[in-house]
Image: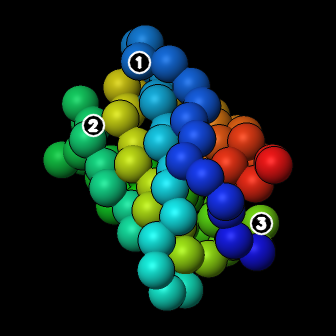
Amino acid sequence: MRIKKPAQAGRRDTSDLLVEVEPIEGNGIEIVLESSVKRLFGERIKEVAEGTIKRLGYEGVRCKIIDDGALDYVIQARIEAALMRATED
């Protein structure tokens, strides 16, 4: 499945994150991460993000995450919301 337009979900608050998605050429998934905990958890955040996008069946997505210590389930929920918004006409 492909997204049709840029969209976002979330907030820039402590223990939350802002997710911005946009369509890209090709079938790849690009993850761009800015995080206050990137040094400790950056790889895990990217794994959760990419896994969520793949599990939902999307491709051709650039996902920018601005994180301030969100837990995995919050990352998944924000990405899912952004993808749904980007898929709507």
* Amino acid of disc 2: Ser
Q: Residue at the spot x=55%, y=86% of the render?
A: 27
Q: Residue at the spot x=58%, y=41% of the render?
A: 7
Image marks 3 and 2: residues in contact by CB distance under 8 Å: no
Above or below — where is 57 with respect to 41?
Answer: below
Which element carries disc 3, helix, strand or loop? Answer: loop
Residue behind mark 2:
35
Circle 2 Cα neighbour tier, 10 Å, few/some/many (<14 / 14–19 / ≥20) = some
Please give left or right for residue 27 compared with residue 84 in the image: left
Whichever of labels 3 and 2 marks the residue nearer the N terminus, that label is 2
Q: Residue at the spot x=40%, y=69% of the render?
A: 30
Instruction: Point out residue 31 in the picture as x, y percentages from the top left corner.
Output: 39, 62
Q: CA distance from mark 3 to mark 2?
A: 24 Å
Residue behind mark 1:
12
Whichever of labels 1 and 2 marks the residue nearer the N terminus, that label is 1
Image marks 1 and 2: residues in contact by CB distance under 8 Å: no
Which of 64/23 is in front?
Answer: 23
Whichever of labels 3 and 1 marks the residue nearer the N terminus, that label is 1
* Amino acid of disc 3: Leu
Circle 3 Cα neighbour tier, 10 Å, few/some/many (<14 / 14–19 / ≥20) = few
Which of 27/31 is in front?
Answer: 27
Instruction: Point out residue 67 in the picture as x, y percentages from the top left corner.
Output: 37, 33
Which element carries disc 1, helix, strand or loop? Answer: loop
Instruction: Point out residue 20 in the picture as x, y percentages from the top left corner.
Output: 48, 42
Residue 55 visible here: no
* Amino acid of disc 1: Arg
Residue 56 badge: 3
Q: CA distance from mark 3 to mark 1?
A: 24 Å
Q: CA distance from mark 1 to mark 2?
A: 11 Å
Name the residue at the front extreme: 89
Please give left or right for residue 14 compared with residue 84 in the image: left
- Of the 4 image quadrants, the one containing the N terminus is bottom right
